Amino acid sequence: MNALTEHPQTSRLTAAAPSPLLDVDGVSLEYRTRERIVQATHQVSFAVDPADRFILLGPSGCGKSTLLKAVAGFLSPQEGEIRLAGQRIDGPGADRIVVFQEFDQLLPWKTVKQNVMFPLLASRSVGKAEAEERARLYLDKVGLSGFVDAYPHTLSGGMKARVAIARALAMQPKILLMDEPFAALDALTRRKMQEELLELWEDVKFTLLFVTHSIEEALIVGNRILLLSSHPGRVRAEINSAQFDMHSSGSVTFQSTAQRIHRLLFNEQAPDVVADHDFHAVRLSY
Ligand SMILES: Nc1ncnc2c1ncn2[C@@H]1O[C@H](COP(=O)(O)OP(=O)(O)OP(=O)(O)O)[C@@H](O)[C@H]1O
Ligand SMILES: [Mg+2]
């Protein structure tokens, strides 16, 4: 019943598995300014399979957003490679859509429906009729069919989050990238959004790469969690969290797994996870 983990060195266990949808392979990322070089991640490897809800979890500054930006194609690795469906990522593309924390990412002069249609039309993915149909479909899926003609400033934070999610899913990306999408919401709305995201996933079965620094959110939203050490981010462990959902947060297993993650994240001196016999290689458990 324990959460399961994989040490970076054991990632070869994945070698025999069918090729993943997203393959992050030994990726080091850095920012170069005139004064200095900041190394954000060091040789990070992980693999996301179709329909995974894969979480990047780690302390502030460990490079989670930087990794997401690299997967989105906004940054190139200094070392290693990122592949999507076997193709090396070398720039942004409509097959990867990012939902950020700030809901002001919606265009204020466009209605809800127009906001959802905008990237579909701008990327010339589909024609106007198809864009409108998809906008209605995904707005319906996030419970906003009554607000298609509303403007963003008339919506609550949770509703703006739903529009941003509908807009991303309407693009039907190969992978949806979310960077702390609910962090700006109050606790109750955040919980509701986590629940709705899981329901949406049950419906659409999209592939999700989700960044958070909340252990509880990671366990609820994800089926797999990659733990990153503090700056520069290195892979500390991978946890299988498929057994947890909205209703398990009070359970003993949930709490003990959360505590264990906490120790791994914040006790950098802890012995290597691979030496912990309660943990097993996650990929073997599928
Ligand atoms: N544009 C930038 N220029 C220089 N350094 C940067 C830039 N953006 C991020 N960094 C640095 O890279 C490291 C990783 O940053 P990143 O934003 O990826 O962390 P994070 O894990 O997302 O943190 P948080 O949980 O606070 O969002 C940090 O040390 C940060 O200071
Ligand atoms: Mg961040």
Image: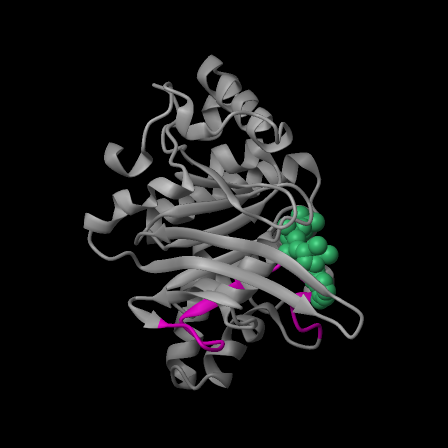
89 within the magenta span: yes
Residues 223 and 118: in front is: 223
Location of residue 245 by image quarter: top left
- Colour scheme of the picture: one colour
Query: Which residue is painted at 57% across and 33% down in the image?
Result: 215
Q: Measured along the vertical axis of the image, is residue 209 above or below residue 260? A: below
Residue 225, percent from left and from top: 45, 39
Q: Measured along the vertical axis of the image, is residue 176 above or below residue 254? A: below
Q: Measured along the vertical axis of the image, is residue 221 above or below residue 43? A: above
Q: Which portion, as a residue range, is magenta?
A: 88-108
Residue 13, percent from left and from top: 26, 42
Which quarter of the rendering shows the N terminus? Answer: top left
Residues 27 and 183: in front is: 27
**Left or right, residue 137 beside residue 184:** left
Q: Residue furthest top?
A: 252
Residue 126, percent from left and from top: 38, 82
Q: Measured along the vertical axis of the image, is residue 115 above or below residue 161? A: below
Residues 273 and 256: in front is: 273
Location of residue 94 by image quarter: bottom left
Q: Is residue 251 visible?
A: yes
Residue 235, percent from left and from top: 49, 44
**Left or right, residue 270 beside residue 170:** right
Location of residue 115 by image quarter: bottom right
Query: Which residue is painted at 59% across and 24% down in the image?
Result: 263
Query: Which residue is painted at 24% across and 50% down in the image?
Result: 15
279 within the magenta span: no
**Left or right, residue 166 beside residue 180:** left
